[in-house]
Amino acid sequence: MHRLWLVFSQAVTVAVAALFVVATFHPEWLAREASPAAGRTTTVFHEAPPQHAASTGGAQRADSYSDAVDRAMPSVVNVFTAKESRGMRSPLFDDPIFRRFFGDQLPDDAQRAASLGSGVIVTQNGYILTNHHVIDAASEIEVAFPDGRKMLARVVGNDPETDLAVLKVDAGGLRAITFAAGDSLRVGDVVLAMGNPFGVGQAVTSGIVSALGRSGLHINTFENFIQTDAAINPGNSGGALVDAGGRLVGINTAIYSRSGGSMGIGFAIPVSTAKQVLDQIVANGTVTRGWIGVEIQEITPTIAESFPLGGSRGAMIAGVLSGGPADKAGVKAGDVLLSVDGKPVANPAAMLNMIAALAPGKPAKLNLQRRGKSLDSEVIVGKRPRPKPRAE
């Protein structure tokens, strides 16, 4: 009996030792498929994806906006314009020494100036949005696409009062940008500015939305700018301002600068304004706005105190065009416009936008304050005259 117990003990010891060795050096030999009946479970370890997954169709990295750039950049083009200005011919062109250095590059009766900007493809059949000041008075417009193609473009229509213009190239199957919802942008959102700064080629800069609804800058007649610190430089005008998803939120148009370069204050026209102008120009070749024929001014604290207005809300009517819609409706200089069709007027810029949005030929109700008394008037909205071309 003692001998049998000894043999059993030795066998157990050898088995335990063998199990220890196998568990230490070859644990996979012990793995068994879980048996539902026995209630056992098996732990499965998942290997982490490689770091380059984002570039091979995986999820976008949190520190990269490459997907947004890939979506939007093919829709951003370079716009080159040429302008011929005729005038007096410099006698230097008759000097053989001058011609030796500069050659016969310019015609005798004209000088040719070139400028550049950017544009955004908005339809697959060749409509392109850009700034009015990029193509203003151009005798020739050429569009360069990201794939290297170049095409001549014609102006479908322009709107100097918002600084927007629509071009058309004879091409199909183009990569049109996606428009963001008009009210989707918030202060603090990340935005990317795309264009052709200084003519160096396509480039993208990033920043955030610094402010919305900027006006009173005296850049355009109708102002409702997006302010951003994304670098916008000369040549970026007319290019795209997109959100982190690559959707168009604005058209780059101006910068605040003392040196000519970006100082972190750039302005873009909101996509809602751009879409309205685009739709009207494509449909009619021009933009039609409401007009009542008044000159307005801001109500300063001094004016509010002098006229006992009881506040600075509204817009002061500084002048009324004789025979215009407002004059026919009985509006007088010195009246304060408080609301249009029941919508309160906050300031002159808001009033200008509200009147412009009215349909010409339709009636509109004005609520005015005159000598401290409230009165209502109905005006038949007129058609806003086109601004006169600037003098060359």
Image (spheres, helix red, strand yellow):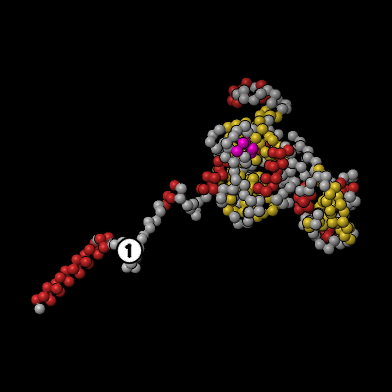
Q: Nearer the viewer, residue 96 or 257?
A: 257
Is 271 on the left-hand or right-hand side of 386? left
User: Is the magenta region chiefly helix, strand or loop?
Assistant: loop
**Residue holding disc 1:** 34
The residue positioned 89% from the left and 61% from the top of the image is: 373
Left/right placement of residue 255 relative to residue 10 reads right
Identify the image quadrant of the N terminus: bottom left
Indicate whether 174 appears above or below 67: above
Residue 257 in sight from this viewpoint: no
Q: Is residue 342 magenta?
A: no
Query: In this rendering, is residue 385 above or below 229?
Result: above
Spot occupied by residue 363 in the image (x, y as percentages of width and height):
84, 49
Residue 29 in the image, given as x and y percentages of width and height = 25, 60
Q: From where the camera sits, is residue 222 visible?
A: yes
Q: Looking at this view, name the residue that lies furthest to the front.
A: 37
Residue drawn at x 64%, y 37% is 127
Q: Residue 336: x percent and y percent?
A: 84, 56
Three-letter code for the amino acid on which mark 1 is drawn: Ala
Q: Which residues are magenta?
A: 124-128
In this rendering, position of residue 93 left or right of residue 313: left
| Label 1 crowd (10 A; few <14 / some 14-19 / many >=20) | few
- Assign a secondary structure to mark 1: loop
Residue 212 appears left or right of 16: right
Residue nearer the viewer, 156 or 107:
156
Measuring from the top left, give residue 109's x and y in whole percent.
70, 24
